[in-house]
Structure formats: structure tokens, C-alpha cells
Amino acid sequence: MLPVERVIAEEGLVATPRGARLGMRLTWYRSLPFSTVEVASVAIDGAPVDLSDAVVEYDDQSWPLAEMGEQTNSFWFIRDSAFLVLPQVQLTPGDAHEVTLVLNVNPPYIPGMKRVNPQTATLTVG
């Protein structure tokens, strides 16, 4: 799989006191503002994850996932991972889970384009 096609980052899935933390990679060939990227869905072991209280973390910043469309001045650089914190998901380190992440990219310079980028991987919780 080419790096641009991999949406689950090398950092994978980690259990934290704030909930599960999933590493994400930008699925485009150049950096984009976060406002043009959409976390369409997350599923763990086939069960959809409620994203209503999810938080995005990137470069010492964080904001509610619901506000990602407002992040026009925060750019996601293609070499960096962003993280999705899922407060409702409590996991045990060492357990393996099948994780599906779907990211949609809407490049601002290609009006009307929406690239859907799904990936499913079995991850061991760190």
C-alpha cells in the first residue's frame, strides 16, 4: 500500500486515560487544511464508534472533531500523523482489534471532488 493510501498511522491504536487514541495519516499527495478532511467513520471489531465527543490532536493543538471543518488555518502536513481521541472507547493494552477508519478528502482546488479513503487493519493496543 502506498503511504498516500494508508490512513491508519504507524502509531496505531493506544489506550490512554482520556480514551483510545488512533493515529491517522493524510491521504493526499500534498498538505491540506484540516477543514478539507473529514473523518467519515471509525469501527472497532465491526462496531461503529460514536464520534460525537471525539477530539483531533495535531502539533500541540486539539479541537473537537465536530469543529474540524472550521480549521481553515491549521494545515495537516503529509509527513505528520494526526490523532483521533475516542473518549468513549476504553481498551486494554496488548489486546488486538480490527480497526476501520474512513477519511474523506475534499481538496479546495478541485471543486466537487471527494476522495473516500478507507483502511481496515488489525492493531495491537499500545
Image (cartoon, grey):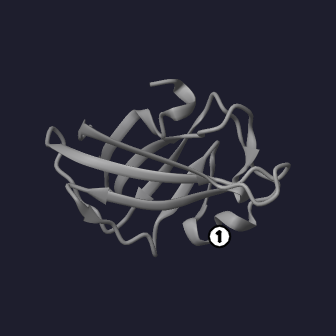
> Do we see residue 18 in this rendering?
no
Q: Check the picture and name the quadrant holding the N terminus.
A: top left
Q: Check the picture and name the quadrant holding the C terminus.
A: top left
- Closer to the camera, 18 or 118? 118
* Residue pointed to by mark 1: 67
Quarter of the image for residue 19 reads bottom left
In the image, taking residue 30 as reference, residue 118 lies left or right, namely left
- Picture coordinates of residue 41, whole percent (x, y): 43, 62
Q: Secondary structure at mark 1?
A: helix
Quarter of the image for residue 93 reads top left
Vertical side of 2 occupied by 97: above or below:
below
In the image, taking residue 66 as reference, residue 126 lies left or right, namely left
- Picture coordinates of residue 13, whole percent (x, y): 33, 43
Extreme-front residue of the structure:
112
Label 1 CA crowd tier, 10 Å (few <14, some 14–19, many 20+): few
* Badge count: 1
Quarter of the image for residue 104 reads bottom right
Residue at 59% in and 72% down: 66
> Do we see residue 80 in this rendering?
yes
Q: Amino acid at mark 1?
A: Glu
Residue at 61% in and 32% down: 80
Extreme-bottom residue of the structure:
52
- Picture coordinates of residue 94, whole percent (x, y): 15, 38
Extreme-top residue of the structure:
2
Residue at 74% in and 33% down: 30
Vertical side of 117 occupied by 86: above or below:
below
In the image, taking residue 70 as reference, residue 46 lies left or right, namely left
Residue at 57% in and 67% down: 64
- Picture coordinates of residue 115, whole percent (x, y): 61, 50
